[in-house]
Image (cartoon, rainbow, N blue to C red):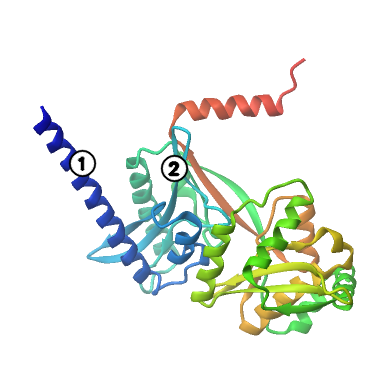
Amino acid sequence: MHLVFMQEYLLKKFEILEQEKDTMLNKEKYVEFCKDIYVPIYSKAWWLDAVCGEDKWNVWLYEHNSQIFAAMPYYFESRGNYKYITKALLTQNNGILFKYPEGAKSIAKQNFEEKVIEAACSFIKELNIDVYEQQYHYNFTNWLPFFWNRYTAITRYTYVLENLENIEEVWQRVSSKYKKNIKKGYKNAAIKEGLDYKKFYEEHEKVFLKQGLRCPFSFETWEKIYQGSQINRCGKILYAEECGGGNIASVLFLIWDDESVYHLLGGSIPEYQKLETYNALTWEGIKFASEKGLKYDFEGSVIKRISKSFREFGGEPKSYFRIRKVFNPEIVRQEAEAFIENNCLVE
């Protein structure tokens, strides 16, 4: 009996080691794949290591003749007894990345997308998870193959400034109200770089604490993001220092990839909100994107107040999809009951 137990234990241990080996190999292949196509920063391996943890994300590869044509990085999360593939913290998008066959025209690209998504859906089903939900980059527009596989999609929005070559023309797109606020911010503070990342977190926490909220990410997560951005030369901190008093009035952290600068983290310190320095910081971020020849992505919001603010800077709405499927009937029941409770009045 003891011998049988030991054999089962060793077999299980061997299977785990083989899975870990396959995971590492897939990640190595994925890093090489990412060198051949545009990959948004939120799907970069270093980003996923930082926000997920190295052992909490994996990647599915679509291979043909030993060549990778598509990849889907994904984050695993347990919620009680349920297993999710879901959006990682501070991660606007993930989803499938396509490397289209050379010379493919529109119809060929759509056929290719259908083939890849069908294969991805088969893979997801085999994982025996309870819920799949990923937010896709706004460049992804064809979610129909997911629909055929009984997935759903919710449309979300980010706001993006494109064509930033001529900063004077960009300035003309800003509303008169925000032009006034930006000028006021420059008058009330000095815009600086080089704030220590520990001090940034301390100041950024104040944005939430004043509202009675906790910062939604830990210092450890922030430290990994910041250090990863410095190693990969794709992140910087801006801050506004109050004129006269020398206090920090607002902070902003930018990251970027080959296409866009992202307005990732920031806010006004509540005591200095009326100085309008955060608007000035945002304008500095836009100018930085212009200098680098990149777009500026405001990291949009469906919150009316925030989305309106991004429009004041001239940001154009870009729709993207949150694609989802619930595999566990119990979760379907729970969500239906919650919807009825929250949306139906009971006399």
Residue in view at x 68 percent, y 80 percent: 288
Q: Secondary structure at mark 2?
A: helix
Q: Is residue 234 left or right of residue 180?
A: left
Q: Is residue 92 visible?
A: no
Q: Residue at x 62, y 82 (%)?
A: 293
Q: Is residue 159 above or below residue 182?
A: above
Q: Position of residue 286 (x, y in %)?
A: 71, 75
The residue at which mark 1 appears reads as 12
Say which quarter of the image contains residue 298. bottom right
| Crowd rating for badge 2 (residues with CA inside 10 Å; few <14, some 14–19, many 20+) | few
Residue 240 position (above or below residue 329)? below
The x, y position of residue 211, in whole percent, is: 78, 48
Q: Nearer the viewer, residue 247 or 192?
A: 247
The residue to which callout 2 is attached is: 148
Nearest to viewer (mark 2 / mark 1) = 1
Viewport quadrant of the N terminus? top left
Q: Which mark is residue 252?
A: none
Q: Quadrant of the C terminus?
A: top right
Q: Amino acid at mark 1?
A: Lys
Residue 195 vs residue 67, the one in the foreground: 195
Pointers 2 and 1 in contact (CB under 8 A)?
A: no
- Looking at the image, residue 220 lies above or below residue 195: above
Q: Amino acid at mark 2?
A: Trp
Residue 177 percent across, percent down from the top left = 89, 67
In the visual, does 248 lie left or right of 71?
A: right
Marks 2 and 1, how far apart at CA: 37 Å
Q: Is residue 39 left or right of residue 307?
A: left
Quadrant assignment, res 340: top right
Q: Residue at x 32, y 66 (%)?
A: 28
Secondary structure state at the residue bearing disc 1: helix
Viewer-closest of 132 and 269: 269
User: Looking at this view, is 122 or 3 the one in front?
Assistant: 3
